[in-house]
Image (cartoon, coloured by chain):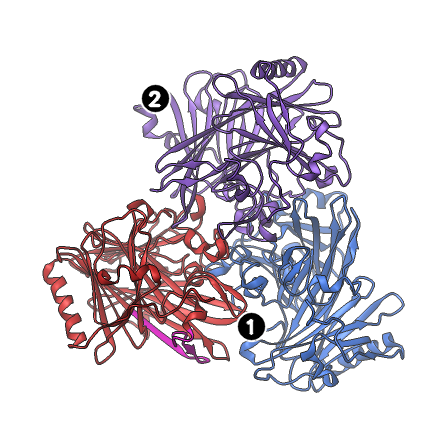
Chain colours: A purple, B red, C blue
Amino acid sequence: MKLLPLACAISAFTLSAHALAWDFVLLDSDKPAQNQRITSEQLGVKVDKPFSITMRTLHGGRQEGVSLIDIDNGTMKLTLVPTRGMNVLHAQVGDARMGWDSPVKEVVNPAFIELNGRGGLGWLEGFNELVTRCGYEWVGHPGMDNGELLTLHGRAANIPASKVTVHIDEAPPYAIHVRGELKEQAFKKVDFSVQTELVTEPGAARFVLNDTLTNNGDYPKEYQALYHSNFSTPFLEEGARFAAAVKQVSPFNDKAKGDLGDWQTYRAPTRDYDETVYNVVPYGDAKGDTLTVLHNKAGSLGVAVGFNVQQLPVFSLWKNTDTQGQGYVTGLEPGTSFSYNRRYQRPLNLVPTIEPKQQKQFSISYSLLADKPAVDKALKTIDTIRDGRQTEVRQRPLVDLSKE
Amino acid sequence: MKLLPLACAISAFTLSAHALAWDFVLLDSDKPAQNQRITSEQLGVKVDKPFSITMRTLHGGRQEGVSLIDIDNGTMKLTLVPTRGMNVLHAQVGDARMGWDSPVKEVVNPAFIELNGRGGLGWLEGFNELVTRCGYEWVGHPGMDNGELLTLHGRAANIPASKVTVHIDEAPPYAIHVRGELKEQAFKKVDFSVQTELVTEPGAARFVLNDTLTNNGDYPKEYQALYHSNFSTPFLEEGARFAAAVKQVSPFNDKAKGDLGDWQTYRAPTRDYDETVYNVVPYGDAKGDTLTVLHNKAGSLGVAVGFNVQQLPVFSLWKNTDTQGQGYVTGLEPGTSFSYNRRYQRPLNLVPTIEPKQQKQFSISYSLLADKPAVDKALKTIDTIRDGRQTEVRQRPLVDLSKE
Amino acid sequence: MKLLPLACAISAFTLSAHALAWDFVLLDSDKPAQNQRITSEQLGVKVDKPFSITMRTLHGGRQEGVSLIDIDNGTMKLTLVPTRGMNVLHAQVGDARMGWDSPVKEVVNPAFIELNGRGGLGWLEGFNELVTRCGYEWVGHPGMDNGELLTLHGRAANIPASKVTVHIDEAPPYAIHVRGELKEQAFKKVDFSVQTELVTEPGAARFVLNDTLTNNGDYPKEYQALYHSNFSTPFLEEGARFAAAVKQVSPFNDKAKGDLGDWQTYRAPTRDYDETVYNVVPYGDAKGDTLTVLHNKAGSLGVAVGFNVQQLPVFSLWKNTDTQGQGYVTGLEPGTSFSYNRRYQRPLNLVPTIEPKQQKQFSISYSLLADKPAVDKALKTIDTIRDGRQTEVRQRPLVDLSKE
């Protein structure tokens, strides 16, 4: 692996007006992805735990040509996939792995996926990330809407990122920002761009996504966003629990009705369980901020996923507690929308509109809760957000899926 | 950018029998696309305005791996896209840009496009060229024909070219020829190849496409061709006009009926206009040659698109005078056929057949009309072609689209 | 072409426990495909006929980025396509070419193919190999099954191989093994891997495929396999014959009924013939081994395809004796199944199940029969396998295709 020639990599831009940062271009229209590495040592940054950002490319199989960015912030190791919507493949702190074991082992290049295959379920041939971006023209199950087959969860996860950059603050805590742009464009159909950003601070067991959706077009457009955030062991286990400040919960479909009483508790890997999904409307605090937590049975290890209900007003809890081999995984999924096909969500007012040139921000934080005090503190935060407000438990799905 | 090692690049072939040319291979089965540059200076050609041909590759996003060829003939700068059917991305003479601003900003690698997506409109995810080749198995709107979904405008624009070469005449005017082959093949279905050629002369504000379609198969086959040639400002503006020697004109559909009276005049960018299309049957001169002109309101700037009605008997005028952001553009589209789905065009006798081993030539010229005298001269040429013959204005579309 | 740095290429693994072989990695997740060459001379192997294995990459057109492996075993030259399911493109011994001339001239990168295009016939845009792997989720004609469009002959031929290796036995006869893994995975749908292997011995006019299908999932899964093995001249000609130990034969469809009387004899290239297909159930010997032979009219040249009826119980004879340009070719196709859509084959008990973690082996041998004695010997072997047992000739297809 070649060292990045730093003299070249530090842009002139950096050295002038914005002198409080280092900026590196990893990929651009005239710069191919190549093996490269940026380290705190190279930058002369004195930190307790040295950090590094490394780019590499996968070969063979359906992952031919896929670029990965590994970030080691000294505490957490993260892998991003520029070739797949800047998705977060996995994150690791010591033994605690955020992510899951999908049957899909390769990091699949979208060039090899037909999203329209399998009746619109082609997306499943690449799905294996910790955070998979869903959207932004649509999310949800495949089906016809306005005469067009909407494929599962939209195209974002299968759009390779343009212009991927790293920005490191030049002052403590030297936050690391990795950015990449997704262009979701089709003549007469859509002119979106999404500036994605992942931020993590050296030494932190935490990262944040800050995405900005822009409607570059001249007309208002429907849009949907959903952050499919997927966890397995060691957080998910028999007796593991989900906690949130819940305003309303309802079963996604008839199947989920049966387990509604236990919707916040998880099963062990269960043969033939497949999945149940619960539609959640969370409460936010005065600013709209809210927190959701998944923790193990003992309450000694967990993850917290934070977001803002003004940006992402609803949340799907996807409980796919089938066998390990089939995919033992739960999805904590803040979104503008649930996972129904778009045509079902308009009557629920969950297909928002973005005006011409308007921007929509989506910020989601992911934190490891490394011990019982951390879990307890997060649960206490949820209580504070809830502030004594009631939860409405709806017995029936919001959508009657038996009706076409 | 590396200089091409000329000693190697000039083929032995050149130096013997066909000594009146220089020949270069830019891309072949054993030669990957790479940054390279050929200049008149290298060749020792004395011209008033030096010329160059440059190959480069795009990276990032959905344009990863797309090759471009930039031709600077000293007066006109042209960009071709070998990875997308040898399409002409844009051409520029001084301030006058031939081409348009599509919402699709990337030059999209066909590997990332599902033509069958969006109900057969996946083509729209890559459409942004000055000249987009449509065909050659079919052109037209998506729809079922013979039990198969024909996707919008065929596959040609999304076929990467094989064996891309540059040929420069060794005698004045040192015409530059860029050639690439498109293979449109599927077992039991089609065995076409298209030898594409773009020719431009150093110093000229003009280029010509010379394409040769070959049916390599043993059976006669239906084929269709349409050259989707797209212009915007500075040619297109409120009051801009289209001129041609028109034998017959008819509205494409009911929507186009309303504006039939003004079919040769353009609107300013118009919110919610979308598009109107007029089906034109042009007159040719004694040899079948004809000319079409788009010029600005003042008649001081224009483009002329010339072709032969024996090769391309019909013409679509696509008036997409919607907002700039949505795509303010007009298409001058000579073709074997209109833009209806193929099943509608058989009764119109616009689905010709190519016999086994037969070849069909398509030549189309594109010229800048840089001032009023140039525009006037082109309009006069049209008059000469028309030679006093009448125009039939049909009030109703040739096809009743309400019938399935 | 660069020589492979042998010091590096010979793995440490080789030099220790398994000292009786040389092992080379041609392609892996961290090793891109590159031009490389392994020769018997480099290895210091003394053989009568030196052998070599060469890797190269194709460029331009729809074959951009396709890797090929050429094996020259001293007698037979073989070309494998890692990018296309480790298919065998062609094999050659002197003048005798195993393979055929498809209208598809490029070795098409699956990135450019939409299997779901053309109503599920997109596979035809890449079909040109001597051996095309079909399966393993399904084989057969496109059509709906369980609410999903199954595309022609499954996905295997369009899956690029992961981790491609060469293993050469260090003792005579120094057998050459080329291996590559196919991952056929989709969340909730399938978790198959196929370890493919091609084995050939230096100097032999013969190769063997040894494939191992593994169901990595936790649930039993339906699977199907079919080895589409395609031959043309010099084996196929007017009066050429097919021989096998046939337990039962039936016409695939109504069209094939007409030629049932001559089902083992071939026509010259025949205009408008298209194809006929015969469904064969072969007899095996006591171990299940069976042999099929295609030989020329004189019986002086042939190929033998051997397999085991416990692994691959049925066989399709595909007689596509249309014109040379359309594709004059016959397929000898051992399989778990015939070429009907999967939904038709369940009632025939031809959709087997693979249990979780279970493996299925498929071995198929391909031998040149270089002269009359070799052909006669192979025909005699077939007689021995048949052992006097009767052939049931069914007049009607096993499946009534007129019923949806």
Residue C100 lies in what quarter of the image? Answer: bottom right
Q: Is residue B253 above or below residue A216?
A: below
Q: Main secondary structure of the magenta part?
A: loop
Relative side of A400 to B338, left or right: right
The segment highlighted magenta reads: B346-363
Residue drawn at the location 66% of the way across and 65% of the way down: C73
Quadrant containing the C terminus of chain C is bottom right
Q: Nearer the viewer, mark 2 or mark 1?
A: 1
Q: Position of residue C198 (x, y in %)?
A: 70, 60
Q: Which residue is mark 1?
A: B188
**Tag 2: amino acid:** Ala
Q: CA distance from mark 2 to mark 1?
A: 63 Å
Q: Where is residue B305 drawn, in percent x and y? A: 24, 65
Where residue C389 sits, quadrant-wise, is bottom right
* Above or below for C365 versus A62: below
Chain under numbered label 1: B
Q: Can residue B114 be seen?
A: no
Nearer to us in this view, B75 or B174? B75
Q: Relative to B29, is C46 on the left or the right?
A: right
In this figure, which residue is indicated by the disc labeled 2?
A19
Q: Nearer the viewer, residue B183 or C40?
A: B183
Indicate the position of residue A174 as horizontal and vertical percent values. Answer: 46, 19
Is residue B261 covered in magenta?
Answer: no
